[in-house]
Image (cartoon, helix red, strand yellow):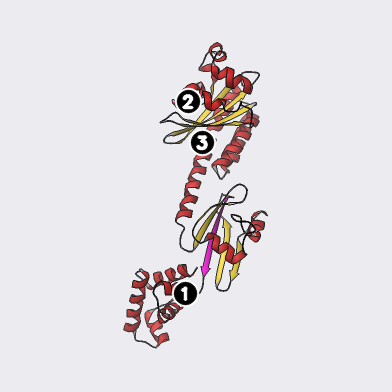
Amino acid sequence: MSWLADSDVGAARGFARGIAEAPTVMDVRLQGLVGLAELVHADVLTWDRVTLSTGAVCHEAVPAGVEPPGVFAAIVKTVAARPLLGAHAAGRRHALRLSEIDEPRRVTHSELYGELLHPSGVEYAVAIAVRTGRDEVLVVGLGRTECEFSERDRDVLNLVRPGLSVALRTAQARARLVRALVANPPPGTAVVLLSGCGEIELSSVNAERWLTEHFGAAEHPGRLPGPVAEWLALPPRPPLVSVRDDRRLTVRLLPGDPHALLLEEEVRTFRAEALRRLGLTARETEVLGIVAAIEGEQEIADELFLSFHAVHARLEHIEAKLDVSTPAAAVARALRESA
């Protein structure tokens, strides 16, 4: 690789830096295919996810429509029907040209060439691969009509392959984290996942209700309320804050992901009806409100004109009803339920 021009090395490193910032797997795919075509001239690019245990292939070609409709699925039922995919599924990861694993004469007489490659304008092909999971390999291919891929092309692809691998793993980890947050957000928070078109794809409990209560109903179901959509469309997007009565909602982007919103609501008073549903009486709600404002059971007793032991007994009763073990935890539970 030492013979690569400084400009080639610089461009490859720029590709790695740029793709490292892609927040989602879809963004990695889009930026990766565009970036690779800029580094190494290609007429056709392919993105194939191979399931190792079954040999099944999930295939995409760019530009759209470059391949005859339905032909790939009809011919390439498993990786064995596509030499480059088979080689990478077997363990190869570095750039590999089609001509290096199959004789050109045999390729041109195959069904794969006659029905798929030649009609798509692919006379020469090269591919790299990265492992994306225990049972999956991603194979990224480049094809062109004229001129075999050179040693320079192979070296450039090998230089960018680790960056592509890191970007994919990072995006996958971020996706797992966001989905975990949606399923089980921390107390007082909610998460909204958006599609590339800005529609709500997935949201955790309370998220859409909070948005509606603070910013009004969306114009169309599944969309963000107008003020939130406008905020999202105008970088740099500082936190969006709304205060309604004794509730303060802060909306911000999850770090590194333009398609995930983190909502944090701070509630300063209890909703009596919410605590009644938990079995608390009006007097217990009053006691809990004082607990939220005053530290120390003796100070609470003084405020309520009760003995220390009476306050202690009432707090234990409230904690039992709320299924918590401390006064602070009782306040936190009451605030969550009041959100």
Label 3: how many residues lie within 10 Å, few (<14), some (14-19) or many (20+)?
A: some
* Mark carried by residue 273: 1
Q: Residue at x 49, y 40 (%)?
A: 169
Q: CA distance from mark 3 to mark 1?
A: 52 Å
For this orientation, the residue located farthest to the top is 105
- Looking at the picture, which amino acid does disc 2 mark? Val
Q: Residue at x 51, y 25 (%)?
A: 76
- Seen from the viewer's position, the closer of residues 20 and 13 is 20
Instruction: Give the position of the N terminus as an image quadrant.
Output: top right
* Residue 163 at x, y percent in the picture: 54, 36
Query: Are dots 3 and 1 in contact, CB under 8 Å?
Result: no
* Residue 246 at x, y percent in the picture: 55, 73
Name the residue carrying label 2.
Answer: 79
Instruction: Tell which circle, 3 or 1, labels the residue nearer the N-terminal end.
Output: 3
Confirm whether the magenta stretch covers residue 263: yes
- Looking at the picture, which amino acid does disc 3 mark? Ser
Name the residue carrying label 3.
Answer: 165
**Of the two numbered discs 3 and 1 in the rendering, the one whose residue sits closer to the viewer:** 1
Q: CA distance from mark 2 to mark 3?
A: 21 Å
Instruction: Tell which circle, 2 or 3, labels the residue nearer the N-terminal end.
Output: 2
Would you say residue 149 is visible in this rendering?
no
**Of the two numbered discs 2 and 3 in the rendering, the one whose residue sits closer to the viewer:** 2
Dot 3 lies on which element?
Answer: helix
Q: Which residues are magenta?
A: 258-273
Query: Are dots 1 and 2 in contact, CB under 8 Å?
Result: no
* Residue 274 at x, y percent in the picture: 46, 72
Dot 2 lies on which element?
Answer: helix
* Residue 206 at x, y percent in the picture: 51, 62
